[in-house]
Image: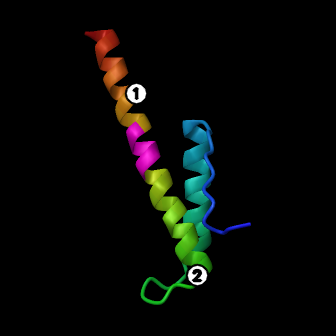
Amino acid sequence: MSCNTNIDLTIGLHDAAAVRAALFQMTAQDSYEFPGTRTQAIRRVIVALDEKIEAAVDAAVVEDAQQDG
């Protein structure tokens, strides 16, 4: 099995935020200058979660504005 195989995961916004926070706390003490391979992988996931969370929040704000307007 290749390590380059991607997976798709669908989770709720609140679960994504909770997982993101836990991952961030887990790597908060790790080096930013010389992070290990595991820390680099976790930080890539954090960035991906940040992007998806931001997009979901933005979409929810637009939807709410459209319903109010």
Q: Residue 20, located in which quarter of the rendered image?
A: bottom right
Mark 1 or 2, which is nearer the eye? 2
**Dot 1: what SS?**
helix
Question: Label 1 neighbourhood size at 10 Å, few (<14), some (14-19), many (20+)?
Answer: few
**Dot 2: what SS?**
helix
The three-letter code of the residue at mark 2 reads Thr
Residue 11: image location, x then y, percent: 62, 39
Dominant SS in magenta: helix
Does 33 sit left or right of 10 as displayed? left
Mark sitting on residue 60? 1
**Mark sitting earlier along the chain (1/2):** 2
Question: Label 2 neighbourhood size at 10 Å, few (<14), some (14-19), many (20+)?
Answer: few
Q: Residue 29, located in which quarter of the rendered image?
A: bottom right
The three-letter code of the residue at mark 1 reads Ala
Mark sitting on residue 37? 2
Residue 34: image location, x then y, percent: 47, 90
Q: Is residue 28 visible?
A: no
Mark sitting on residue 30? none
